[in-house]
Image (spheres, rainbow, N blue to C red):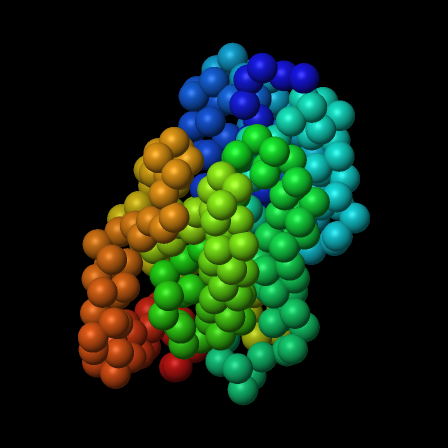
Amino acid sequence: MSAKKVVIITGASSGIGEACAYAFANAGYHVVIAARNTQKLADVKQRCEQAGANTLVVGCDVSIESDCKNLITKTLDAYGRIDVLINNAGITMRALLAELDMDVLRKVMDINFWGTVYCTRFAIAELIKNKGSVIGVSSVAGIKGLPGRTGYSASKFAMNGFLEALRIENLKNGLHIGVICPGYTSSNIRNTALNADGHAQAESPFDESKLMPAETVAGYMLQMVKQRKNEVVLTAAGKLTFWLNKFFPRWVDRMIYKVVSSEKDSPFK
């Protein structure tokens, strides 16, 4: 069995997942990186190993239960332990429900919610044994429903509820459950967002250079694991939304509608 701690990161081929791989590699972990695109994972592995981390690549579609089970099995075969599971793999969508193909909703739920459930279920016994951490990468859309992103918000609300219930289940056995809500972060998630008929929209509605860097989110996540925090909400806009929604939910509704309506190629136009 490895003496070093082992982290599994899903959706590690780009964005927050890739940044997390480098952050945990630099922190001295063995790193298991999972995603569908193994060619991109090979590049991430090379950079992790340059930081001195023993790194395992596992091709995995988290919407497929058997792929998630294989991810956990291969990790245990390679290292004999799991200390941290970061459920990062995710996809978003951008369309009004009235115009949306139902398969888009199913796909978003399968990846964002069921992917978290599958990976956590197969890893949980080992994580409990090691008093490890399960981290869910949620969103401000899991705190406040976002118009035009009904499926995405639903998946993140579901993830949050699942992990909160799991935290209480394991209140007395030392398992750490954390949820991080990054707010708008510079990544490719908006470029791959599904439109009404399930195709990638291919272009972000935001200036990505002005958003929080993925590396910053990864730094917060590493600290979250070290300090065993239950919840972290990032970005000024995310924190403001979180607190204002507690006291002025109807006002926040109107503000969010206004913001989404002003986006480039807004679904309201």
Outermost residue, bottom side: 98
Going by the image, does 243 lie left or right of 25?
left
Outermost residue, right side: 66
Quarter placement of the C terminus: bottom left
Asked if one can make out residue 96 in the rendered structure from this viewpoint, the answer is: yes
**Residue in the foreground of this view, choosing between 221 and 205:** 221
Residue at 21% in and 54% down? 236
Asked if one can make out residue 201 in the rendered structure from this viewpoint, the answer is: no
Residue at 58% in and 15% down? 3
Residue at 71% in and 28% down? 76
**Residue in the foreground of this view, choosing between 114 and 126:** 126
What is the x, y in percent for residue 34? 64, 38
What is the x, y in percent for residue 1? 67, 17
Going by the image, does 105 lie left or right of 150?
right
Residue at 63% in and 55% down? 117
What is the x, y in percent for residue 8? 59, 35
What is the x, y in percent for residue 206? 34, 58
Outermost residue, front side: 172
**Residue in the foreground of this view, choosing between 257 and 219:** 219
Q: How many marks?
A: 0
Going by the image, does 180 lie left or right of 82?
left
Q: Relative to 123, is 149 above or below?
A: below
Q: Relative to 33, is 156 above or below?
A: below
Going by the image, does 242 lie left or right of 98?
left
**Residue in the foreground of this view, choosing between 120 and 213:** 120
